[in-house]
Image (cartoon, grey):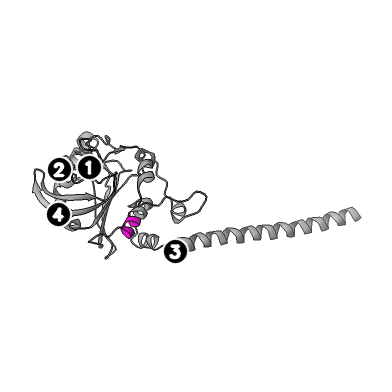
Amino acid sequence: MNKLLLLSLWAIATSGFNVNQNHSNIIQESTSEIVKTTEVSKDPIRGLYDEMKLSSILKWEAFEQAMQGYNQLRAKNKDIITVIDFTLPSTEKRMYVIDLKAKKLLFHNIVSHGRNSGEKYATSFSNKHGSFQSSLGFYETQETYNGGNGFSLRLNGLERGINDQARPRAIVIHGADYCSTDVIKSTGRLGRSYGCPALPRELNKPIINTIKDGSLLFIYSQNKEYLASTKIIKAPKLNQPTNTMIATQHDAELDKGKGVLN
């Protein structure tokens, strides 16, 4: 009888300990989630991204990096920013023109990359003359002109050694017949340029007129060599949680963008 009583008492005590332990674990997990949510909500960039409902359209990392540059660089036109996401294939809409003042996505469309940057994906990038490759990083849009490709927009590369040869290389935004859904249907990818971000003919003029004269353009790729070379993008410190780490969106095709930077 004494043994039975002792076993009963032990079971009751153990049960109480488990309940308290479980309760403690629940509190810890809830507190952790609150901390994460609070950390994200303190970030105005994340707040803008959420307010514009971009999560299903534009990668968080691309937007965050673009806004890092926006907050550091003195663009003449602060209302507009353009992002090109070269982690996506040329068959997908990977150009985004954003009105930050109105908090509105103005254009979301296909765009071509350089012929020597890759086939369906842009994986290799260069700042060299004659490379026929795209260059990553931040640009300032400049003046328009009418040239061999019609109405075009000159670009000034803002990152030394990364894209600062854009204007001497004649890297411009222009329309092209090879940038169309018909080409995608017939070849499985867009045609490619000599390094210019080429647009569909029907969108060329309205997009150029929207972004011309001093707005920022950011070409994103999550390229390791670019991230190691740029002085604009701040890489997260190891073992230190950041908003980017909390909000990371896994993409099966991301590694395709980690190519070569010449």
Task: Say which residue label 1 marks.
Answer: 112
Query: Which residue is drawn at the image coordinates 19% and 44% (left, top)?
Result: 171
Tell me which amino acid carries mark 1. Answer: Ser
The relative height of residue 196 versus residue 81 in the rendered view (above or below) is above
User: Which circle's residue, 4 or 3, is located before the other in the chain?
Assistant: 3
Q: How far is the residue under mark 4 from the one under mark 1?
A: 21 Å
The relative height of residue 68 versus residue 120 in the rendered view (above or below) is below
- Dividing the picture into quadrants, the one containing residue 255 is top left
Query: Which residue is drawn at the image coordinates 50% and 59% (left, top)?
Result: 36
**161 or 234, which is in the foreground?**
161
Task: Say which residue label 4 marks.
Answer: 143
**136 or 84, which is in the foreground?**
136
In the rendered view, does 222 fall on the left or right side of 120?
right
The tag on residue 176 is: 2
Residue 71 in magenta stretch: yes
Judging from the image, what secondary structure is the residue with disc 3 in?
helix
- Point out residue 40 in the picture as x, y percentages from the top left corner: 45, 60
Judging from the image, what secondary structure is the residue with disc 2 in?
loop
Tell me which amino acid carries mark 2. Answer: Ala
Judging from the image, what secondary structure is the residue with disc 4 in?
strand
User: Which circle's residue, 4 or 2, is located before the other in the chain?
Assistant: 4
